[in-house]
Amino acid sequence: MSGDRDTILSRIRHGRAERTVAPAYAEVTAKRQSAAPALPRVGDDRVAAFSERAQRLSSDVLGPMAAADAGRAIARYLQSRGLPSRAVCWPDLAGHDWAGAGLAVEARAARDTDLVGITGAFCAIAETGTLMLLSGPATPATVSLLPETHIALLPVGRIVARMEDAWALLRREHGALPRAVSFVSGPSRTADIEQTVTLGAHGPYRVLIVLIRE
């Protein structure tokens, strides 16, 4: 009988302790989840911050410049590196005067034989120097993934401070996610083979970002 009594009393004490601790734990958890995370400082000049970080990731950056000057800047860039002046672009960018800049550009999804692809960008992230691209009928993902050279036209007004801002902008402007969201942080690279960094293993060898002044 004594043993049964002790068991019952032990269960009562344990139950009271759980009821005392649980509300306190819940309160602490709620406060932790509601607290704003400590975010790194990006600086007031998001364009400069993005450019500096993108170049650290081996992207080339030109501009800011007027949209009308982008074609000629791209042509000079390709010529200076001995690259072809023939390219494929997003259908979304078909209205640019590529021919006037000396470029032969087709507006379509890329094929494995295309060497240069020209895209826009949904936005860019200053904190990491990263482009955010959304797939769609007018913005096929292949144009940034298949060619050896990826060129992105980026309006400076689409540069946000952090990754959290990029997702918030996507939810605000599109609501539902597209089929694919791509993040481009410089040329494709891997160190899988003998721990040696190799560019272009899974995508473009080079990335050029042309900043467009609005």
Image (spheres, rainbow, N blue to C red):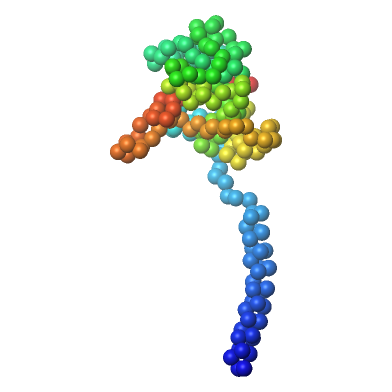
Q: Nearer the viewer, residue 206 or 10?
A: 10
Residue 8 in view (yes/no): yes
Image quarter where the C terminus lies is top right
Residue 51 is situated, as x and y percent measured from the top left of the image, at: 50, 29
Which image quadrant is residue 163 in? top right
Above or below: residue 172 compared with residue 146: below
Q: Nearer the viewer, residue 141 or 56?
A: 141
Which residue, as the protein is rendered here, is positioned at the far left? Answer: 194
Tell me if I can see residue 63 in this picture.
Answer: no
Q: Position of residue 28 (x, y in %)?
A: 64, 63
Relative to 192, does residue 55 appear above or below in the rendering?
A: above
Q: Is residue 110 left or right of residue 161?
A: left
Residue drawn at 60 percent across, 32 percent down: 179
Q: Residue at 67% of width from left, 35% of height from top?
A: 176
Decide: is 96 above or below 34. above
Residue in the image at 55% along x and 10% along y: 98
Which image quadrant is residue 81 in? top left
